[in-house]
Amino acid sequence: MKIFNVRASRFLALLPLAVAASVLSACSSAPPLFSSDGRPTNMIQCPANGGWSTCRQNARALCAGSYDVLDQSSDNGQNNLLIACKAQ
């Protein structure tokens, strides 16, 4: 009975790790998204209560200045800005 308890406790201790690994591997297998002209896209997210200025500042920093907005939305208190950096 004691051996079963040890094995069960080890299994239960490793279960969250196995679940996390499978979730992360599922996320990493998603293909990157590209704009219609082939540029990679980025989703910038910021709190909706701050307006769009934080998202725009983050986009400028990520793209070293120039970017195109492909889509923008607000959902669950968060602004989402889908961008593609312009060629330098």
Image: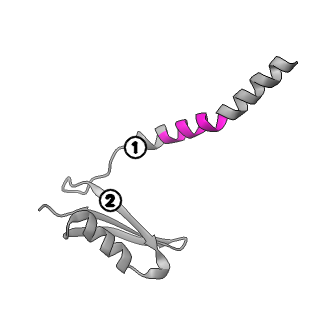
Task: Tell whether position 23 is magenta.
Answer: yes
Q: CA distance from mark 2 to mark 1?
A: 14 Å
> Considering the numbered disc 1 on the image, is that residue within a helix, a strand or a loop?
loop
Residue at screen point 25% across, 54% down: 40
> Considering the numbered disc 2 on the image, is that residue within a helix, a strand or a loop?
strand
Res. 69 in view: no
Task: Tell whether position 8 is magenta.
Answer: no
Magenta stretch in the rendered image: 15-24
What residue sits right under mark 1 in the picture?
30
Q: Nearer the viewer, residue 60 or 68?
A: 60
User: Badge 1 local density, few (<14 within 10 Å), some, or many (20+)?
Assistant: few
Res. 55 in view: yes
| Percent coordinates x, y for residue 67 in the rendering | 22, 68
What residue sits right under mark 2 in the picture?
42
The part of the image, by quadrant, that contains residue 7 is top right
Q: In the image, is 74 to the left or to the right of 57?
A: right
> Disc 1 residue type?
Ala
> Disc 2 residue type?
Asn
| Percent coordinates x, y for residue 30 in the rendering | 40, 43
